[in-house]
Image (tube, rainbow, N blue to C red):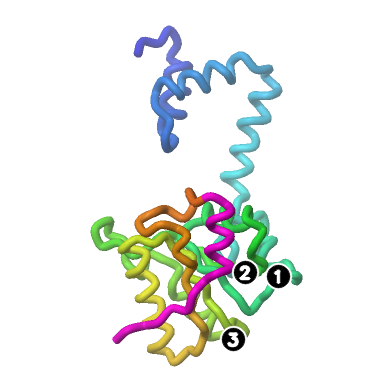
Amino acid sequence: MNFSSKLLEQAVEAFSTLPGIGRKTALRLVLHLIRQSEEHTEQFSEALRQLRRNIKYCQICHNLSDEAVCTICSDKRREEGIVCVVETIRDVMAIEDTGQYRGLYHVLGGVISPIEGIGPADLSIDSLVDRVHSGGIRELIMAISPTIEGETTIFYIAKRLRERNLEVQLSTIARGVSFGGELEYADEVTLGRSIVTRVNYQVKD
């Protein structure tokens, strides 16, 4: 791809580093921004700067937040005794869109995957166990994608809780979400029903 402008090339290269954005799509986006007013472009870039400088991770659930504690954790109308454990922040958004769940969340930051070099220490499992240990949580809903890695992660968490003699009900989302599928891509109706019709999780020795 030949560029008549070094500035244009640099902008295309920057956009093409985004997930799912190839060079042709990046060029289309950059040309779109060029056609906009300077004020619009400055607002766009300022929004990104503010995001990078000021975005935080909730100190309780690890969701994205403007403050130290996110709006979900600080919402007194939420059911504090139920915590939905998810892989990513996108899963929180997907479940919230169903309108079927009014408890709290805990974002692990992924799943255990030795092939990808992700172990328990790379996830927020310790803070989850500490949350349960602090009391007040009666149920953990393991809303983790039904994959081999997801099942391994659920088993590991259950084992950690049992080792510390923490009595809490473990449940998994109903299998309206197909095995091997990613939670964030499930439709809202299926995902909502899977949360509502969750089943108890049994740890086998």
Q: CA distance from mark 2 to mark 1?
A: 7 Å
In the picture as drawn, the residue positioned furthest to the top comes out as 4
Q: Is residue 57 visible?
A: no
| Residue at the (55%, 66%) spot, across then down | 195
* Quadrant housing residue 118: bottom left
Q: Residue furthest left?
A: 115
Q: Mark 2 belongs to which amino acid?
A: Leu
**Residue that carries the numbered disc 3 in the rendered image:** 135
Going by the numbered disc 1, the residue's amino acid type is Arg
Q: Which residue is mark 1?
A: 78
| Disc 2 + disc 1, Cβ < 8 Å | yes
Label drawn at residue 104: 2
Q: Assign the C terminus to one quadrant of the image.
A: bottom left
Which of discs 3 and 1 lies nearer the camera? The answer is: 1
The magenta stretch is 187-205
Give the residue type at disc 3. Answer: Gly
> Is there a contact, CB below 8 Å, between mark 2 and mark 3?
no
Q: Is residue 156 left or right of residue 81?
A: left
Which quadrant does the N terminus fall into? top left
Judged by depth in the image, the label closer to the viewer, 2 or 3, is 2
Q: Does 197 lie within the magenta span?
A: yes
Q: Which mark is residue 189?
A: none
